[in-house]
Image (spheres, rainbow, N blue to C red):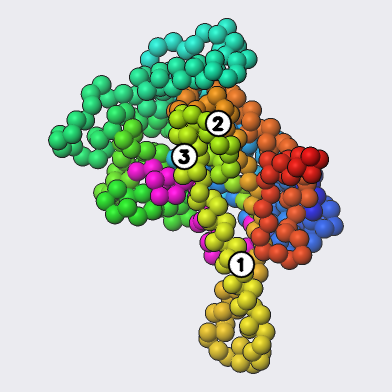
Amino acid sequence: MRIVKTTEDQISSERDSKATQEVIEKAPPEVAQQLSQGKAVFQPHRAWLPYQRIALVLQGGGALGAYQAGVYEGLAERGIQPSWVAGISIGALNAAIIAGNPPAQRVDRLRQFWQTISQPGFFMETPAIIQSMVEQWQGDLRRMANGFEALRTMIEGQNGFFHPRGWIPLPGIRLPPNKLSFYTTRAMRSTLERFVDFDRLNSGEMRVSVSAVNVATGNFHVFDTRDRKLRADHFLASAALPPGLPAIEIDGAYYWDGGLVSNTPLFPVLMERPRVDTIVFQVDLFSARGRLPEDLIEAEARRKDIMFSSRTRATTDYAQELSHQRRLMRELLELIPEAQRRDNDWCRQAAEESMVSQYNIINLIYQGKPFEGATREFEFSAVTMRDHWASGLRDIRQTCEHPDWFDLPAHGAEYATHDVHRAVNRSANRRA
């Protein structure tokens, strides 16, 4: 299946049935057939993809989240806009910027957002001439520069994001959960209200879901525009990582960062009912695979990689196991006479549960650099932000060099996964 671009001269931006019919008449034959059968998404001025759901799934990872902004820029370049964006922690904040702005403004607003929060909390930014020097450094020099910027974050906080309280909640001092933190996030509330149109975010144009954990019960909770109107508090709750950031009160309950339970919001997307053909752009900030650490700093960084990436692997493994069980259920139903299947409630339920839908997961995984160390998720300097953004843009552009990856899974398979870094490694191994 080719990705076919459309323009304002080719199709109408109206979404009523008449406009849709006009689009079908002008689309390439294979696209027209898929549209008429409801097997492709009609998105004016966007790419054609043979899926009924286009999901963008954004993992948590603090300052590494600029990588996700770069990925989104690359998707927007090719006219690919999600119909559902799901995020946790920094991924939830990126989701708010994406869903809360018109398509033509999303990349600019993401850039403005990241330029805002990559500024120091109090003192002046590192001079541009020094930044240009740091960008050229590698090894220990760059690690020291990054460590210095991370230290500044710990002391000053980040502009438009979080600031030190000025006092430390010492043990034994009883306070409500929204006061038990080293920093406040009042600045981020103002930043979200500046960069996000919450009326647009809640309009239904794009589904949005963000996840947090209930402090009292420990239960994982998904806040979804399908069920309620989301406001700044829901996104702040998803990013409220203790003990640095305070719990957020919503409807009388307190919530912390959803990454405490699962750092990857992929599971709700794959488990959504009814199942439809879905392509998922899964943007992870921690890689399950990595080289062996050689010192304590690298060991701590590797620990975080393993801890925060594990849910992606567990979720995809579980989803593929369910796919296998559905296939077995379909084969068993074929052994039952049709008349009995039609009249038996259990058979009807089994038939509905075992319906075939296809899932294509495009993995985009940030590849950590040796000089970053264990402070990378709170090293918010402008130099590092630009580096992360460029990495995301480069990865999605390389992914789009494989247009066949965007096809439905081959041979009727229910699941397919693609990862540009895995493909590069396989190619390198074959050459070796």
What's the CA distance linking mark 1 and mark 2? 34 Å
- In the displayed structure, 292 sits above or below 163; it is below
Say which mark, if any, is on residue 420.
none
In the image, is 222 to the left or to the right of 39?
Answer: left
SS type, badge 3? helix
* Residue nearest the observer in this picture, 38 or 289: 289
Q: Residue at x 43, y 52 (%)?
A: 222
- Across and down, in percent, residue 393 comes to 66, 32
> Of discs 3 and 2, which sits in the foreground?
3
* Residue nearest the observer in this picture, 431 or 212: 431
- For disc 2, the neighbor class at 10 Å (few under 14, some 14 to 19, many from 20) is many
**Residue 15 visible somewhere in the drawing:** no
**Label 3 is placed on what type of residue?**
Arg
Where are the magenta residues, as a range? 256-278
Q: Which residue, given by chain and number where applicable, does mark 2 sit on?
A: 66
> Of discs 1 and 3, which sits in the foreground?
3
**Where is residue 170, by image quadrant?**
top left
**Is residue 231 a member of the stretch shown in magenta?**
no
**Label 2 is placed on what type of residue?**
Ala
Q: Looking at the figure, which quarter contains the C terminus?
A: top right
Q: Residue furthest right?
A: 29
Q: Residue at x 46, y 29 (%)?
A: 297
Q: Which residue, given by chain and number where applicable, does mark 1 sit on?
A: 323
**Is residue 265 a member of the stretch shown in magenta?**
yes
In the image, is 218 to the left or to the right of 117?
Answer: left
Q: Which residue, given by chain and number where applicable, does mark 3 sit on?
A: 303
**Label 1 is placed on what type of residue?**
Ser
- Across and down, in percent, residue 7 comes to 76, 41
- Do the residues bearing badges 1 and 3 touch, measured as CB atoms within 8 Å? no
